Amino acid sequence: MDEQWRPVMGYGGYEVSNLGNVRKQGQTKHLKRCTGYGMRRVVLRSGNDFHLISVAKLVLEAFTGKMPKGMKPSCMDGNYEHLELTNLCWVVRRQKKYKKTKRQPTKPSTTMEDLINRHSKYIKKQNGDGSNSTQ
């Protein structure tokens, strides 16, 4: 597959390829990808601001158009290193459904005195004679 380059939408001066590479416009060196937390990302500069953007999102937006509302990029084979256009697609973003419940107040923390009393009762029970010795 031949590598084709397109401009990155919303970030002038950057290009993205159908093979998942990102570079500054007019240069041959690829930008370094950030790993961890799932999808591979790159840092792009817009004015004085820096943005961490998913490479999959950049590839799909450059070659298929703007990301549809409620969607996110995904790798069809589940391999986040394989960011070719043929392996990427838009999928529906899962909706977070949190059950709104009233929070219950927490119990007061156990004091050291409570712990000593419990421990003493346990030792007395183990000894069977009511003494507090551990012999």
Image (tube, helix red, strand yellow):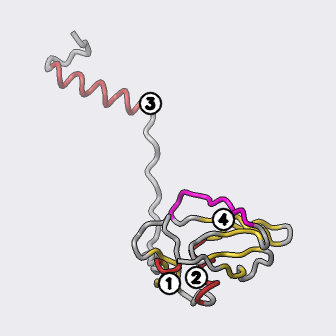
User: Which residue: 50% across, 64% down?
Assistant: 81
Q: Is residue 25 left or right of residue 114?
A: right
| Callout 4 crowding tier (Cα within 10 Å): few <14, some 14–19, many ≥20 | many
Which quarter of the picture shows residue 104?
bottom left
User: Which residue: 48% across, 68% down?
Assistant: 82
Specify the farthest residue to the right: 48
Mark closest to the chain's N terminus, 1 or 2 = 2
Q: CA distance from mark 1 to mark 4?
A: 19 Å
Mark closest to the chain's N terminus, 2 or 3 = 2
- Residue under label 3: 112
- Residue under label 1: 90
Q: CA distance from mark 2 to mark 3?
A: 59 Å
Proximity of marks 4 and 3: CB atoms separated by less than 8 Å? no
Q: Nearer the viewer, mark 2 or mark 3?
A: 2
Mark closest to the chain's N terminus, 1 or 4 = 4
User: Which residue: 58% across, 71% down?
Assistant: 20
Q: Residue 95: give x, y in percent of width and height.
A: 46, 81
| Callout 1 crowding tier (Cα within 10 Å): few <14, some 14–19, many ≥20 | some
All told, the count of numbered labels is 4
- Residue under label 2: 60
**Residue 77 on the magenta segment:** no
Label 4: state its secondary structure.
strand
**Residue 32 on the magenta segment:** yes
Proximity of marks 3 and 1: CB atoms separated by less than 8 Å? no
| Callout 2 crowding tier (Cα within 10 Å): few <14, some 14–19, many ≥20 | many
Can you say whether 46 is above or below 92 in the image?
Answer: above
Q: Label 2 sits on what residue type?
A: Leu
- Residue under label 4: 42
